[in-house]
Amino acid sequence: MTSMSSLRVLRVSSRAFVSKSSKGRASAGGNPVDIFAPLALGGNARTALTVEERVKLSRSCDWESIVIENIGCGDHSSEGNMPSFHFHMPSGEEVSFCAHAAIGGCSLLALLRHAEGQAADWRARSELLSGLIVADSKPIGASKCQFTAAMDPSLIYDATIRDGCVKMDMDVTHEEEKCNPESLLGAFLSEIGLRLVDVSKCGGSLEWPTFVNSSVARHKTLIPIKSTGRLHAATAPNDPEKFREMCDSIGSTGVYLYSTESDPGEVPVHFECRQFPRASGYAEDPATGIAAGCLAVSLDKRGIARGNNSGTSRWRISQGVAMGMPSTIGVEVRRTGGQGLTIGYDASVAFDSVEVQEI
């Protein structure tokens, strides 16, 4: 018999930013994220994980993970009652925000609300969730979600979920600075199998952000590459420890390579990107929402793809192609006056498995 202090955790494996099939269904690729949701058992059961428990669960994952607290409160508007998201790297480190993990978490909350209305207990709900996953997230209508990030609960995020597609907004502050010294660019490129001649130079009056640290949550180092062929020629860092030290020396959490064969005047502009993180427990990321947001805002700052001076720019970013995990990130940058910025993400989510673990 389960004791009153026991805690069971729903574990759902999912992928965010998946590419869609020709029939419009979420299919290949995407960035994996394991989602953990504590389930209360009994009137006195605890409903939150300790730091040690969250770290242990995150270290059992190959990619990022998220723990959702206040899971039954997604429709509440008061800050203290909103779902709260803890974001963890597979190393166990907790980070302030992870876009693809948040998108996966919001999509799961929509499924849980649907299951709650059709099943009386968590055993029945988990079985219903399994059925929904097998059915490729069959249509369940639209749902709205507000949530906070546990490391900064003062910020409230909004998302709309419809049949496995998530639109999520982030109000952000953009920071950008040139990496110093600039002579390190060649060393970074050499570490990932490229050379200075592979760097792209934008024509005319446009200028690609080159070897700059751009941040909307964490600093990512942007480097334009002249062709997708050369982009695919990049390799994982030769020496991961040296690469981590190099990133630390310029205050970066990862190198974000980008390339386009689109006309910069098109809307949306299509880019293909690759991210090599500073030290996340894996060598390359198949889809990086924060890095895509950093790139979009830095390009928007330079007037690229602004679109009829409307104050809105749109981007379609492919990532993970070279890894065999093709992902698609839709990004919109909206300038709200003054220094105000909102990043809107458009993503498809796929669920792969669901299980209940006891702690």
Image: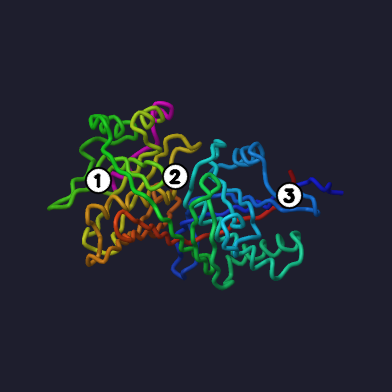
Is residue 299 left or right of 46 when viewed as pictured?
left
Residue type indicated by callout 3: Arg
- Magenta stretch prevailing secondary structure: helix
Q: Tell me the residue that label 1 is attached to.
A: 209
Considering depth in this image, is 201 or 307 the residue closer to the camera? 307
Give the foreground label among 3 and 2: 3
Residue type indicated by callout 1: Pro
**The C terminus is located in which quarter?**
top right
Residue at the spot x=43%, y=54% of the render? Answer: 326
Helix, strand or loop under label 2: loop
Could you tell me how far apart the alpha carbons at marks 1 and 3 are, in whole angstroms? 47 Å
**Colouring method of the image:** rainbow
Considering depth in this image, is 256 or 178 the residue closer to the camera? 178
Numbered range of the magenta stretch: 229-243
Q: Dividing the picture into quarters, in which one does residue 131 lie?
A: bottom right
> Residue 72, image x and y in percent?
66, 60
Q: Tell me the residue that label 2 is attached to.
A: 285
Residue at the spot x=42%, y=39% of the render? Answer: 277
Helix, strand or loop under label 1: loop
* Mark 2 Cα shell of 10 Å, populated few (<14), some (14-19), many (≥20): many
